[in-house]
Amino acid sequence: VQLQASGGGLVQAGDSLRLSCAASGGYFNNYGMAWFRQAPGKEREFVAVIRWGTGSTAYADSVKGRFIISRDRAKNTVHLQMNSLKPEDTAVYYCAARSPWRVGGMWASDEYHFWGQGTLVTVSS
C-alpha cells in the first residue's frame, strides 16, 4: 500500500485548505484511513479517521467542527477539509492507513501500518 499526501501550504488564520491522500496498491474496503499531524517539538497526534467501507468518521476534539474527513471511492483518495484554520494547526500532516478496521486504537499512530510522506501546513496569525 502506498499513500501520497498533498495540498499543504501557507495560509492565514481563518482560511481553509484541503489536503488529499491518494492511496494505491490495496483493496481498501476494510481499512481505516486517518490523518495525523506533528508540530515542531511535539509528538505526532491524531486528527481524524474515516472507515473506508461505511464512511463513518471520528475527530480529535481540537478539530471537531472545523475539519471534515471524507473519501472518494472512485479515486481511492481521502480528503481533509480544514476550515477556520488557527496558528496552532501548523504542522506536518500525515495520512495513514490500517487494516482491518476496528474502533480500538484508532487514534494511536503505532496502530497504523502504512504512512504517506507528510505535507506541511503553516497558518500565520
Image (spheres, rainbow, N blue to C red):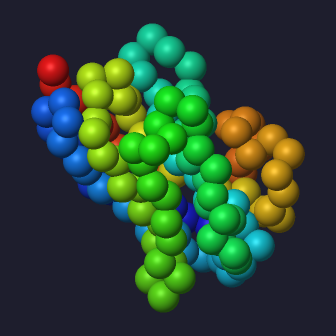
Quarter of the image containing the C terminus? top left
Residue 26 shows up from this direction: yes
* Residue at position x 70%, y 77% in the image: 53
* Residue at position x 74%, y 46% in the image: 106
In the image, residue 24 above or below residue 46: below
Q: Is residue 55 left or right of residue 75?
A: right
Q: Is residue 71 left or right of residue 52?
A: left
Q: Is residue 61 left or right of residue 30?
A: left
Counting from the top left corner in percent of width and height, residue 114 is at: 64, 54
Quadrant in the picture for residue 99: bottom right
In the image, residue 52 above or below residue 62: below
Quadrant in the picture for residue 20: bottom left
28 or 61: nearer the viewer: 61
Counting from the top left corner in percent of width and height, residue 59 is at: 59, 44
In the image, residue 71 above or below residue 7: below
Quadrant in the picture for residue 111: top right
In the image, residue 51 above or below residue 8: below
* Residue at position x 50%, y 71% in the image: 71
Quarter of the image containing the N terminus? bottom right
Residue 117 shows up from this direction: no
* Residue at position x 45%, y 55% in the image: 68
Looking at this rendering, what residue extends furthest in the bottom direction? Answer: 74
48 or 120: nearer the viewer: 48
Counting from the top left corner in percent of width and height, residue 29 is at: 71, 78
